[in-house]
């Protein structure tokens, strides 16, 4: 997590040399060797919220400090703060009701303002990570597409379930927006996205359903990310890059696990497929989120040099 001094340094950078806000007109470049690189903002989950607000300003400052201009924006970083795991059932229900109201009732102008602040900083919100599940109301599903549009996102990514996606598809088709399903490594539940078969079941639902392939989780589930990418690249919108060990192994520093990050990136470079590669810092690092994401980005630059 950031110390107050680290966060103050980022704030000073926003005012000084990094020129955030309306003064910045050029897009922050993060294409390396022809591969569009970005970040899943979950990587910055430990950053502080603005008082009474969200983490959007911290994300802008962190992306600028890392030199990354493209992102997939994780929805909980914009939403009301979640209750702790030790909260009782009544507190959890109140928080759930508050979140539902927030999603449905927050004016779209609020999200347009976030879009404008990212754009003024030269940053692109490519995807809105809004994870549909079976508890979502129809209003929450529909509103997710409206929020994504207001943020300027091209797609929605979602750690959804197959049953939830069956409900989501009519909304995706009406809004004419792609939903890319994100995999984890739970191969024991056929309702979860983890296997090649679960991806096939999802993409068969509609042309609006694509794949957001997490190569770390895919490796932990003992699948071959390079082979899957070769065969199914036309249905993949973006990747999550992380390093995990096989056999449901842990997240580890990049280059020390079994995930073929190098091979995947070099395949993207050779084939020039329009698939974004989004860094996701999820292992236990020794530095701040900005320092750790910068290390991951340096790894990418070295691989694609």
Image: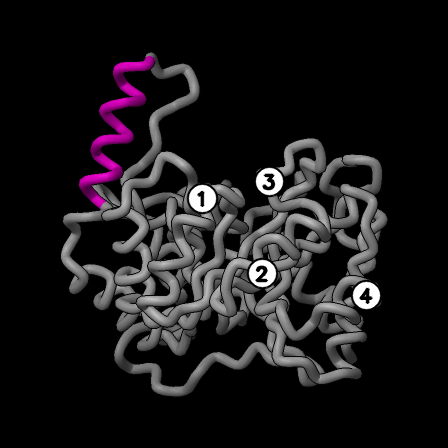
The residue at which mark 4 appears reads as 262
Residue at (54%, 50%) from the top-left corner? 43
In the image, the segment drawn in magenta is 89-102
Q: Which residue is mark 3?
A: 192
Identify the secondary structure beneath mark 3.
loop
Question: Tag 4, which secondary structure?
Answer: helix
* Cα–Cα gap, marks 4 and 2: 27 Å
Callout count: 4
Relative placement, left or right, of 94 versus 44 is left
Nearer to us: label 3 or label 4: 3
Q: Which mark is residue 223?
A: none
The residue nearer to you, when weighing 79 against 283, is: 79
Q: Are marks 1 and 4 in contact (CB under 8 Å)?
A: no
Please check the rendered image and state whether residue 90 is part of the magenta-colored stretch, yes or no: yes
- Residue that label 1 marks: 164
Image depth: mark 1 or mark 4 in front: 1
Q: Is residue 248 magenta?
A: no
Question: What is the CA distance from the residue labelled 3 to the residue labelled 2?
Answer: 14 Å
Element type where label 2 sits in the image: helix
Can you see residue 46? Answer: no
Query: Could you say which is closer to the camera, residue 148 or residue 262?
Result: 148
**Front one among 203 and 284:** 203
Mark 1 or mark 4, earlier in chain:
1
| Circles 4 and 2: CB atoms closer than 8 Å | no
Residue lying at 80% horizontally and 74% vertically, measured from the top left: 266
Image spot of residue 83 (x, y percent): 34, 26
Residue labelled with disc 2:
203
């Amino acid at each position: 997590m950031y110390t107050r001094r680290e966060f103050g340094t980022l704030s000073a950078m926003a005012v000084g040399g990094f020129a955030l806000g309306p003064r910045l007109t050029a897009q922050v470049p993060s294409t390396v060797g022809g591969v569009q690189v970005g970040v899943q903002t979950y990587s910055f989950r430990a950053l502080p919220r603005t008082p009474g607000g969200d983490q959007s300003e911290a994300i802008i400052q962190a992306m600028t400090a890392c030199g990354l201009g493209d992102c997939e924006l994780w929805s909980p970083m914009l939403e009301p703060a979640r209750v702790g795991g030790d909260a009782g059932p009544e507190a959890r229900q109140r928080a759930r009701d508050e979140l539902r109201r927030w999603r449905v009732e927050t004016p779209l102008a609020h999200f347009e303002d976030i879009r404008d602040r990212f754009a003024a900083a030269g940053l692109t919100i490519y995807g809105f990570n809004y994870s549909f599940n079976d508890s979502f109301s129809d209003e929450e599903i529909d509103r997710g597409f409206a929020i994504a549009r207001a943020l300027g996102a091209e797609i929605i990514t979602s750690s959804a379930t197959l049953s939830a996606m069956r409900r989501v598809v009519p909304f995706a088709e009406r809004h004419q927006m792609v939903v890319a399903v994100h995999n984890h490594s739970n191969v024991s539940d056929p309702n979860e996205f983890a296997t090649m078969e679960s991806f096939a079941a999802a993409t068969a639902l509609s042309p609006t359903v694509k794949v957001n392939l997490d190569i770390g989780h895919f490796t932990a589930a003992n699948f071959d990310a390079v082979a899957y990418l070769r065969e199914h690249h036309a249905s993949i919108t973006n990747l999550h890059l992380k390093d995990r060990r096989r056999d449901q192994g842990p997240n580890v520093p990049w280059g020390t696990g079994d995930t073929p990050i190098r091979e995947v990136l070099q395949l993207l470079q050779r084939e020039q497929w329009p698939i974004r590669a989004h860094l996701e810092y999820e292992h236990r690092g020794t530095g701040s989120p900005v320092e750790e994401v910068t290390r991951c980005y340096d790894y990418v630059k070295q691989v694609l040099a």
